[in-house]
Structure formats: C-alpha cells, structure tokens
Image (cartoon, rainbow, N blue to C red):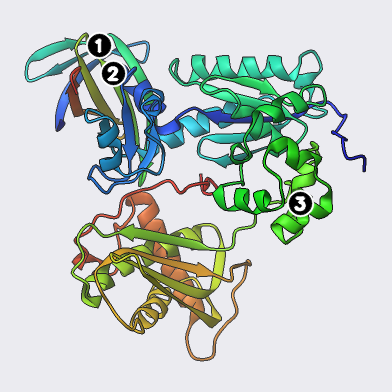
Amino acid sequence: MDTLFFNPNKSYVMHIDVNSCFATVEQQANPFLRGKALVVAAYNSPGGCVLAASTDAKKLGIKTGMRVKEAKLLCPIVLVLTPDPDKYRFVHLGIRKIVSYYTNDFSPKSIDEFVLNLENYPALKNSTMKNIGVEIKNRIKKEIGDYITVSVGISTNKFLAKAASNLKKPDGLEEINKDNFLEIYSKLKLTDLTGIASHNEARLNRMGIMTVLDLYNSPIWKIKSAFHSITGYYWYLRLRGIEIDNAKEVRRTFGNSYAIPSSNGTLTELYPILATLVEKTGFRLRRAGYFARGVNVNLFFKDHTSWQKSQSINQDLFDSRDILTSAISILNTVPNISPVHTIAVSVFKLNKKDSIQGDLFQDVYRKRRFTEAVDTVNKNWGSFSLMPAGILKNEHKILDRIAFGGVREL
Amino acid sequence: MTIDERVTVGMVNDIPKYMIWKGRSHNIVKVGLRHHFIEGKILYHIFSVTTPNLFMRLKLNTSNLIWTLEQIEDQLT
C-alpha cells in the first residue's frame, strides 16, 4: 500500500456526539440552569466523580472524571446535580428514533454517541452527508430539546468520523476526507486521537513519532514496534480511512458495583450489599436470556489497594441464590479486610440457550419456574417487590446508573 | 427542594398550563423537557416546567391520573 494513501471512497460514516450530554439534558429540562457552570456527579459529595460538565463549566477547566471538590476549587459556585438516568435514556431513545429514519445500519456507542453508516441508503439519494448532518441536528433541537446540541463527524471510517466530531465542540459538523486529512492531521496532537493517552504517546515518542502527521507518515514496522503488537497495523489503516473497527460487540459479562459512602471494614457489612448487587445482576442476566458459568467479586479498598477473585462453576447459573452462594464463598476468602471503597460482582462465561440441562440432584426446572415467577412479579410491580430477606438488612440504596459505554440493555 | 405533594394541573393540548399547589395557582410558561419512565406496570410522565421565576418537576401517574409536585427550585439555585 502506498505510504501516502487515503481511502478514496466517499464518506458514508457519521458519528454523532451529544455535547456535555447529562449536563445539557439537565439544562434542557431546567432553563434557569442554562449558561451556568454545572456538573452532573455520581454523588453530591466532595469525593463524587464528575460524570459530565456543562459547556460553561468546561470553559473554567472542569472536566469529566474530576472529583467534586476539585471542580469546586476551580469554580466555588459550580452547581452539582446527581444523575437522573431516566431523563438521559429518554433523550438517547429520542435520538435513536431520529437516526433510524435515515439508516438501519447504526449503533449507539454509548448513551451519548451514535455511529451511522449511510452507504446505499435512500436518504443519500437526493442529499449529501453534510445536509443529513444538519437535518439531524435540527430535528434533535425541534423534536427533543432546543438546548441540546450535537457534534457531527463524517468520514470513511468510524475512527475518523469520531475524530471529526471532536474537531469542533459544541455544535460542530466536520468531515475528514482524502482532500483535507493532511491539513487536519497537521493541527492535531497525538493525544487528540481516541485511544492514544499519555502511555501510548510515550510509546510512540520513543520511536520518534511526535505528531499525528509523523504517525501517518511512519511505515507499518515502526508503528508496530512502538505498540509491540498488531495494534500498530490497525493505527496505520485507521489514519488512512480504512474501516477496521467493524467487529460486533459481544456480551461477555454482567455485573453491578456500589461505592460505599462509609465503610467499617467488616464482612458483615458487605453481605447485604453483595446480595442486592447479585439480585440486580441475576435479573439482568435472565432478562437477556443468558446463563453464566463463572462469578467474580472485586473489592477496592479505601487505601487504594484492591482484591479480586473469580470462580468457575460447572453448571449453568441463572438463579440469583446460586450466584450469591458462589459470591459469598469467594468473598469469605478475602485475606485482609479493611474499609471498602467499592464492591463489585459480575458473572462471566456467558452462554445463551433456549433449554436448560436437567440435574440429578436438584430440580432445575422448578428453580427456573420459580425465578421466572419472581421476575414477573418484579417486572409488574417494580424492582425488589419480591426479594431475598437478606437484602432487607441493606441500609444502602443502590442507585440506578448508566454504565460508561453501556447501552446494550436500553 | 423535594416536595412530593399532590397538586392540580391544567393542560391544554397535552401541555401543562397552570398548576395549583396549596390553593395558589402558578402559570407555566415553558416545558423544558417531557420524559417518561415505567415503574412496574405504571407509566409515569415527568414534566420539567418553569413559571416566570420557578422551576418545577411534575409527575403524572397514568394509572390513577394523579399529579405530584416532586421538586421546586427558584432561579438562584
């Protein structure tokens, strides 16, 4: 392949990114918050993690991932709101409905990001990608909320479409194609590329690759040496507009976690929380039609250390009681317990099947019918209408959350 | 401020126009966002609305048509 090659095809991939999603949605709902520095944080406490900062908060240097106390140091009057997941899901589904009008080939990458492929779709017959981008932006304003802005990026592959959407925020509409890629690359830093943070930047710098243009101009062997893997080849292709990020995402785990506000560092305190987390995980596992053959428990301690252990099981797990038995037996092996910051449980080795194998020593069919009955009650009357008595001891309210990148269950 | 009190809401063309709380009527000038969610079998509609100087969050329970004022904030929040 010619070193200076760039995919000569027309751009058919569009990346849509809702600007400052959670914060903008809050400002949409409450017009009095518009033009103010506000953050949506996991908890309204000094240690709470900032999930989204409004455009005005970003101008003051407040970023996603900061602690609330850090945001308050930068702006003492910053408003702190806690998440309202139903609101964000509603906006996500509204945008999903709009983009589905233009193409069937789209995937939500997270609660605030969509990737569309419009190749061979009728929407492009009498229009251009840029016009469709403008149309989608206008429809979002009209049909969902006049304060919600999105940045649209267009290119020949998903990676560059995302890079294009990052070029102008908020409310951008940019394209990277064979005619302008060199000019755009010359203005970008390595860390502007999604997937290159300080660690990867250092790897590239060690090979003498200091800029995006250097990376583009580097031969495959050099980039592969920098990354010590095939990843280097993928970067070579990405920057030339070739699609290599088309792999379908496969569900590998289901899990839930909880950050404990004040922990006394005893196992007794963790059991009811674990039971609640397992109940949530088990319900999601069954609702998606999966069985699991492994359980993992993870503890993050206040002293910044962590412990985790997995257990593989030689039978299909679907009943929360079985998952809990396994999770408790794992938890009981923790060598040193100290105050816990976060506890997480997940199930893995997933498989999807319609029927379940019988067991000589227990009536799995009866167990299946029982879990189905409990799930039906909880679906009809709300989560935790029926629950194991052990959960009653849980004094912590495990809030509804939107996982980063996770929209598979919407 | 969280309230959670039953209120009366007047609608015109599916848009809330006024809300009566504690015998006092508040004119609604803007609906910022209207979203819904399902809890168990019940569909709830949430209206995030403003009067000239207040923000209010109104919840409509579609199974019994009861309106609840969930939250009220002034402009200074």
Q: Which residue was labeled with disc 3? A: A223
SS class of the residue under badge 1? loop
Alpha carbon separation for disc pair 1 and 3: 60 Å
Chain for numbered disc 1: B
Which of pointers 3 and 2 indicates the residue nearer the eye?
A: 3
Q: Is residue A64 visible?
A: yes
Chain for numbered disc 3: A
Which of pointers 1 and 3 indicates the residue nearer the eye?
A: 3
Quarter residue A87 falls in: top left
Label 2 crowding class (10 Å Cα cut-off): few <14, some 14-19, many 20+? many
Q: Position of residue A409 (x, y in %)?
A: 52, 49
SS class of the residue under badge 3? helix
Label 1 crowding class (10 Å Cα cut-off): few <14, some 14-19, many 20+? many
Q: Which residue was labeled with disc 1? A: B28
Q: Which mark is residue B49?
A: 2
Alpha carbon separation for disc pair 2 and 1: 7 Å
Q: Is residue A4 left or right of residue A149?
A: right
Identify which amino acid the numbered label 3 is placed on.
Answer: Ile
Q: Is residue A370 left or right of residue A18?
A: left
Q: Is residue B64 visible?
A: no
In the rendered image, the residue lying farthest to the bottom is A361
